[in-house]
Structures are given as C-alpha cells and as structure tokens.
Amino acid sequence: MAWQPRQLVDRLGGHPARSLEIDLESDSGLGSWLIAACLCAARVDEAVALRAHGALRAANCATAVDLAETDPARIASALATVDYPKPEVAAVRLARVCGALVERWDGSISALAAEALDLTEIGTRLTRLAPGLGPATALDFLRPLRDRFSAACETPLSPQALAAAEHLGWIQPGEDSEGEPGALRAALADDPDAPALMDVEAALDRLGRRSCRRDRTARCPLGEECPRRGEGVAAPAPRE
C-alpha cells in the first residue's frame, strides 16, 4: 500500500508535545517543551522520557521557572521513579539549563528567540544555556517551532525523518537535505487530510530510527507494508 501521512501518524503517533499536552503557543509551554527535549536527548527511549516529564509534573517542577528553583536532588528523585538513566546527571543538566534561561532570558523562550537573525544564532543561544544541551537537542527543540520563530524556519529534518520520507516516496533523494523541509511541506499541502508538519515529522523520525536510517527493513514498524521490504536494492548511505 502507499502510505499516507495520516496513516503514518495514526500508526506511529504524533509529536511528543501532543502527548504531554504542552501548549507551544505559551512561554510556559515552550519552557516545558525545552525540558522534554532535554529529557529525550542522549538516546533515551522516548516513552521513558515522556514518563520522566510526567514525574516532574507530578512533583510540581515541570516548568523552566520551577526547575530553576528546585534542588537537583529532588529533580533526580522524581526522575528515578520512572527509571530514567543517570537521574543525578540529568537533574543537574536540567537545573543548569533552566537556571540559565531564567537568569539570562527571564525564563522566556520568546525573549531568547527575539531578534535572533537565523538558525545559527538561535541555536547558539540555546546551546550556551548550559553544557549538555548540544546542537542535536537544540534542533529537536526548534523543529516544531519553525512557524513560531522566523529564526527557526530553516531547521532541517532530522536524518532519520529525511530517510523515512525518501523511503515512503514523499520526497525525492536530495530534496530537503538541508534547510527548511520545503518539499515535505509541499507534499503535505497537497493532502487535505495530512496532519500538521510537526506530527508527520515526529512519526517519520520514529520510522527512520527503527528502520530507514540503516535500511533495517526487518525491523520496520510498518511490517509487510514497508515499501522497502523485498526491493533488493542498496539503501542510501547513512547521513552523519
């Protein structure tokens, strides 16, 4: 079958911010999403990261301002309840990131993004918040915010999402390899039932991580409906 964006999102899920009911239009929501993006870093399983965010919320410390004022030991204790890996290290990282956001930008992502000229500048402002918030995490954070902040509009697809979009035939090889995913946007615009870009991108990223990035069709979550299964052709070289 030819997979459609709605089918893929229904099968693999939308953006994590949806599951966490984070409002990306509010500054408090953006701070909460920054925390979630940090929790998803370092190859932590997404389900574990989402449970960790829920544990912080239950402990009343799921916003940037709250975490900046919370003892890292308490943060670590909350993360440990869901078996988050190395909770003490993660707690210190979150406290530093949120503390710097409050100190330098009054806890506001909108203030951080204000007057940033381009992706390099807004990304640098994010990565300079604290050690442990690297370029990959900054890009993950910015992807659902392309339409919110002009400086983020050129945020590229992740290599995993790019490989999956190519394998599904939604974009051609070489398209959207850098900068704004214009080809994918155009493909979604032609489908009146397509979910939002952020949800499609998240589903593509999950597909790419499981299978497309290394052409592991036997592990593809689409099963026998994987468009690459049985092709007998070499996969594109993995992008570094």
Image (cartoon, grey):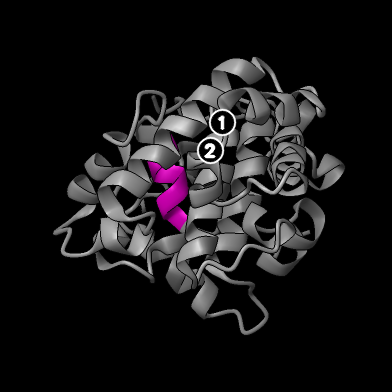
Q: Point out residue 74 in the picture as x, y percentages from the top left corner.
A: 67, 28
Q: Is residue 56 left or right of residue 97?
A: right
Instruction: Tell me the residue at 63%/62% (across/down).
Output: 22
Q: Point out residue 103 in the picture as x, y percentages from the top left corner.
A: 31, 45
Residue 106 sits in quarter: bottom left
Instruction: Tell me the residue at 16%/64% (across/down).
Output: 115
Secondary structure found at label 1: helix
Q: In which quarter of the image is the C terminus?
A: top left
Q: Is residue 42 visible?
A: no
Q: Nearer the viewer, residue 102 or 240?
A: 102
Disc 2 residue crowd, few under 14, some 14–19, many 20+, Cα 10 Å? many
Q: Nearer the viewer, residue 200 or 28?
A: 28
Give the magenta part as a residue range.
137-143
Q: Is residue 86 visible?
A: yes
Kindly report the distance in space between the C-alpha atoms of the residues bearing marks 1 and 2. Answer: 5 Å
The image's mark for residue 130 is none
Q: Nearer the viewer, residue 33 or 117?
A: 33
Give the amino acid at mark 2: Gln
Q: Are marks 1 and 2 in contact (CB under 8 Å)?
A: yes
Disc 1 residue crowd, few under 14, some 14–19, many 20+, Cα 10 Å? many
Which of disc 2 and disc 1 is earlier in sequence?
2
Q: Name the residue under label 2.
A: 160
Secondary structure found at label 2: helix
Residue 78 sits in quarter: top right
Magenta-colored stretch includes residue 141: yes
The image's mark for residue 213 is 1
